Amino acid sequence: MNPINEIRGQAQEKEVAPRVNLSPKENRFINSLKSATPIDWEDWTWQISHRIRTKEDLSEILDLTPEEIEGIEGCGQKLTMAIPPYFASLIDPNDSNCPIRRQCIPVKAELIKSDHELEDPCGEEDHSPVPGLVHRYPDRVLFLVSEMCAMYCRHCTRSRMVGEGSHKRKTSHYEDAYDYIRSNKKIRDVLISGGDPLMLSDEMLENIIKNIKAIPHVELVRIGTRAPVTLPQRITNDLVAMLKKYSPIWINIHFNHPKEITKRVRFACELLTDNGIPLGSQTVLLKGINDKPYIMKKLMHDLLKIRVRPYYIYQCDPIIGSSHFRTPISSGIAIIDKLRGHTTGYAVPRYVVDLPGGGGKISIDPNAIISQNQNRYVLRSFSGEEYTHYDPI
Ligand SMILES: *Cc1c(COP(=O)(O)O)cnc(C)c1O
Ligand code: SF4
């Protein structure tokens, strides 16, 4: 069955009454869609089945650039385009560099493979004891439960496996994954990711969480998702009530730009935190989108305002066709340097590089140690001055 129909069929809840007033942008957008109502807009399954997937549909809401037209025509085999109407309504049609637009509309540069780019840059497949499970660190695993996402980010690290076509690599060998976790007593933390786990129905997701929680040595269940940003309608009362039953569950949300934090996103995040679900964020450092320290700082501040604790900023992994997004590592270091000490510690995430070849994540900080001579350290303060520290001998 078509996965979209499957989801529509499986979504039991029908609590679709508008919970957030439409913004002027959303209103304008909804009026431009034939026969859509505010009730449809609130229904995540409607958003999924009305995603913008073709050049023709997209041309109705904005003027595509030649680079975009080539990108859309060429991206099919690689990573499909799919944009929920809600997310599309955030695009500034007059700005071809709009950060929302660049994350969801393919461009020609995506079709170019540059040096050092790989299909699976972080070596996840090599650390997969069973399909869909990545076991790299001693005490935790990454469990890829879905290949589908609400929106396909053009910079996606897992473009090798996400989408709705036929993939070489399958995610959903759930039973094998449970067996593996059960037989490895060192695993105390399971990170459920994908694709997007929130593209599963509440019932399917609950079943996964229940199976994992039933393993005695698993202390922590985490979910990695982008749905609260690209499809905030997905955070329904029913979903939250289900997650609440399995507390503690930590959720990490992929946020890349302050423009993503709308009233509706705030509503979704508040519903989660009000129900005892701690939220963190992860951000991919993207050239021309969020690589300026002032934009990153605003994003981090805006996240704290909606009670999301910044967790990681990722260096953009060298996946195939990502060179137009990738910044030098020095950009990431400069961002941390402009945050640390200059603003609230909670607003300072770790800047992380997932090592190509499967070495795992390392965090990189601006260098604070200017020199060391036996027990004498010369250290650099946040404002760039030198201070001397003496270790006990
Ligand atoms: C990122 C990741 C995790 C989680 O890492 P934390 O640093 O604990 O958040 C676990 N497994 C794999 C394979 C990962 O890539
Ligand atoms: S939501 Fe995550 S997994 Fe899905 S396309 Fe975006 S980056 Fe990739």
Image (spheres, helix red, strand yellow):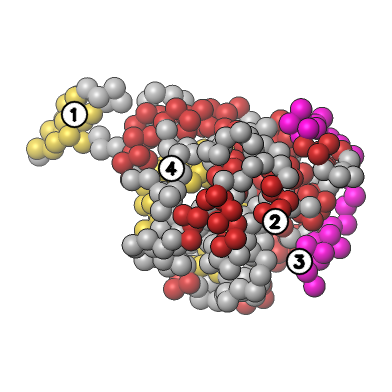
Q: Disc 3 marks which amino acid?
A: Pro
Of the image marks 1 and 2, the number of the one nearer the N terminus: 2
Residue at x 53%, y 32% (from the top left corner)? 299
Q: Which picture quadrant has residue 197?
A: bottom right
Respond yes or no on whether mark 4 lies under 8 Å from ligand 2.
no
Of the image marks 4 and 2, the number of the one nearer the N terminus: 2
Q: Residue furthest left?
A: 373
Residue tagged by mark 2? 53
Residue at x 16%, y 31% (from the top left corner)? 378
Magenta-tinted stretch:
1-28
Q: Secondary structure at mark 1?
A: strand
Question: Which quarter of the figure is the N terminus placed in?
Answer: bottom right
Residue tagged by mark 3? 3
Q: Which picture quadrant has residue 357?
A: bottom left
Q: Secondary structure at mark 4?
A: loop
Category of crowding for the residue at label 3, using alpha-carbon neighbours closer than 10 angstroms: few (below 14), some (14–19), many (at least 20) = some
Q: CA distance from mark 4 to mark 1?
A: 37 Å
Residue tagged by mark 1? 389
Question: Which quarter of the figure is the C terminus placed in?
Answer: top left
Q: CA distance from mark 3 to mark 4?
A: 33 Å
Mark 4, mark 1: which one is toward the viewer?
Answer: 4
Q: Answer with left or right where residue 90 lies relative to residue 340.
A: right
Vertical placement of 15 versus 183: above or below?
above
Residue tagged by mark 4? 287
User: 166 and 251: which one is in front?
Assistant: 166
Query: Percent from the top left, x then y, of residue 203?
Result: 80, 61
Mark 3, mark 4: which one is toward the viewer?
Answer: 4
